[in-house]
Image: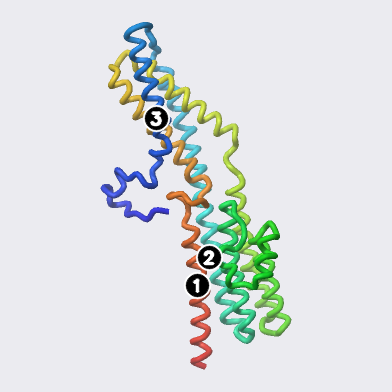
């Protein structure tokens, strides 16, 4: 994700990185050439001319379709951000619980923090169609990391390891029944957040809606020169067709860009940053617990 100051227009007005211009440029160029060709044929051979009323009426419906498309995509983007926020909060609660409640069993406290970090990395790789625990595999036993990787659902395997560690802490008397239930609630919150992100990633917008919108866009932009030929010269017709195509195709492409916000594109969520935040919180919780124990 690109960090920017929304108050500084000059930094964003002509920015290329993060925009959809590069992706829609070939389509816009093709439509511009099409408009120029039709204008030249119209002036030299046949008369291609239709009233602009149809495009005016269809433009309203097309605008509503585009609004729905971008709203639906942004809802998915924001939902993904909310779920990763929930994952970070649940991780902090687990780190806090591991440091404060399981301090009498330090190896179990370390295991809980390690598997919490592994869950975040596993979720990131799963959402990017990868697998494994990434760099977090270095902090857990190798054979357990392999089992989680080979399970087919590494985040769920990490959650299971977390519950096992919490259960072991209860059996050793480091946790009460109530404390075990509270910590396992946070594991459930991790699983719920990961499942919600999976739902967003694996459920695109309905195919019928997407294909209808794109067909309507191409028909609208492709026939627009017929409605402009009477009022514009070849230069004006190409300019107006290019401008309208850029606006409409750009809006549709923005929806495509943000509907699955877990990839590596400039406008996707910074999952690596979220994972680093969780790792940092794990270390801070350990440091605070160590300082508290030393003070006693």
Q: Is residue 276 left or right of residue 97?
A: left
Q: First in sequence: mark 3 or mark 2?
A: 3
The vertical placement of 7 against 207, above or below, is below
The vertical placement of 242 against 36, above or below, is below
Q: Secondary structure at mark 3?
A: helix
* Cα gap from disc 2 to disc 1, whole angstroms: 9 Å
Label 2 close to label 1 by CB (< 8 Å): yes
Q: Secondary structure at mark 1?
A: helix
- How packed mark 2 is, by other alpha carbons closer than 10 Å (few <14, some 14-19, many 20 or more), is many
User: Residue sitting at 73 percent across and 81 percent down?
Assistant: 171
Residue farthest to the bottom, as pictured: 296
* Cα gap from disc 1 to disc 3, whole angstroms: 47 Å
Q: Nearer the viewer, residue 68 or 213?
A: 213
Q: Nearer the viewer, residue 234 or 228?
A: 234
Q: Quadrant of the N terminus?
A: bottom left
Q: Position of residue 253 (x, y in %)?
A: 45, 38
Q: First in sequence: mark 2 or mark 1?
A: 2
- How packed mark 3 is, by other alpha carbons closer than 10 Å (few <14, some 14-19, many 20 or more), is many
User: Residue sitting at 39 percent across and 20 percent down?
Assistant: 34
Q: Which residue is mark 3?
A: 28
For residue 281, which numbered disc appears in the image?
1
Q: Which residue is mark 2?
A: 88
User: Residue sitting at 47 percent across and 57 percent down?
Assistant: 270
Q: First in sequence: mark 1 or mark 3?
A: 3
Q: Secondary structure at mark 2?
A: helix
Residue farthest to the right, as pictured: 171
Q: Position of residue 115 (x, y in %)?
A: 61, 70
Q: Position of residue 118 (x, y in %)?
A: 59, 67
Q: Is residue 118 left or right of residue 253?
A: right
- How packed mark 1 is, by other alpha carbons closer than 10 Å (few <14, some 14-19, many 20 or more), is many
């Amino acid at each position: 994700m690109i960090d920017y100051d929304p108050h500084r227009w000059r930094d964003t007005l002509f920015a290329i990185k993060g925009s959809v211009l590069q992706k829609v440029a070939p389509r816009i160029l093709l439509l511009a050439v099409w408009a120029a060709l039709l204008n030249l044929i119209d002036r030299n051979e046949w008369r291609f001319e239709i009233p602009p009323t149809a495009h005016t009426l269809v433009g309203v419906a097309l605008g509503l379709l585009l609004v729905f498309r971008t709203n639906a995509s942004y809802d998915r983007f924001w939902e993904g951000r909310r779920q990763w926020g929930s994952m970070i909060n649940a991780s902090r609660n687990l780190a806090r619980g591991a440091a404060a409640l399981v301090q009498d069993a330090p190896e179990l406290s370390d295991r809980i923090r390690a598997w919490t970090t592994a869950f975040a990395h596993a979720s990131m790789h799963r959402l990017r169609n990868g697998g494994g625990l990434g760099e977090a595999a270095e902090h857990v036993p190798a054979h357990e990391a392999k089992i989680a990787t080979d399970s087919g659902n590494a985040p769920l395997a990490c959650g299971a390891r977390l519950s096992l560690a919490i259960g072991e802490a209860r059996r050793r008397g480091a946790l009460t029944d109530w404390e075990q239930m509270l910590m396992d609630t946070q594991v459930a919150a991790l699983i719920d957040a990961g499942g919600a992100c999976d739902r967003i990633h694996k459920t695109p917008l309905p195919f019928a809606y997407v294909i209808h919108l794109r067909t309507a866009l191409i028909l609208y932009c492709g026939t627009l020169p017929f409605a402009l030929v009477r009022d514009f010269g070849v230069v004006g017709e190409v300019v107006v067709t290019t401008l309208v195509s850029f606006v409409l195709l750009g809006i549709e492409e923005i929806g495509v860009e943000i509907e699955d916000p877990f990839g590596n594109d400039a406008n996707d969520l910074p999952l690596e940053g979220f994972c680093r935040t969780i790792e940092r919180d794990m270390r801070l919780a350990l440091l605070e617990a160590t300082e508290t124990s030393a003070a006693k």
